């Protein structure tokens, strides 16, 4: 009887380990996916700010007069 209980206990322990491993893998995949989207969003924001600064500096450059 004790031997049977030990075998059942070991089986549950292995099942729990497998479940935790799958859970950790799913959470890690979610974080990687989220990081990709956050990186793309930040890059887009930086490019828009860069374009805004470039457009303002180009606009200002056309109105300056250069002494000859």
Image (cartoon, rainbow, N blue to C red):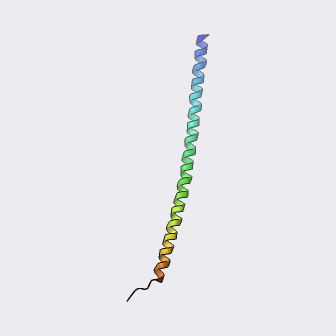
**21 lies above or below 37:** above
Residue at image point 59% right, 36% down: 23
* The C terminus lies in quadrant: bottom left
Figure disc tally: 0
Q: For the view shown, which residue lies furthest in the top direction? A: 1
User: Is the N terminus in the top left, top right, bottom left or bottom right quadrant?
Assistant: top right
Q: Is residue 66 left or right of residue 22?
A: left
At 48% from the left and 78% from the top, the residue drawn is 60
Tell whether 62 sits left or right of 67: right
Compared with 64, 31 (above or below) is above
Q: Is residue 29 above or below residue 64?
A: above
Q: What residue do we see at 54% from left, 56% from top?
A: 40
Q: Residue furthest bottom?
A: 68
Q: Position of residue 12 (x, y in %)?
A: 60, 23
Q: Position of residue 56 (x, y in %)?
A: 50, 74
Residue 46 locus on image (x, y percent): 51, 62
Q: Residue at x 55, y 45 (%)?
A: 31
- Residue 54 coordinates in the image, percent (x, y): 48, 72
């Amino acid at each position: 009887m004790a031997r049977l209980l030990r075998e059942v206990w070991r089986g549950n322990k292995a099942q729990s380990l497998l479940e935790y491993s799958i859970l950790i893998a799913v959470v890690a995949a979610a974080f990687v996916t989220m990081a990709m989207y956050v990186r793309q969003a930040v890059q887009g924001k930086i490019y828009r700010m860069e374009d805004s600064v470039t457009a303002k500096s180009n606009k200002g450059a056309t109105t300056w007069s250069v002494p000859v």
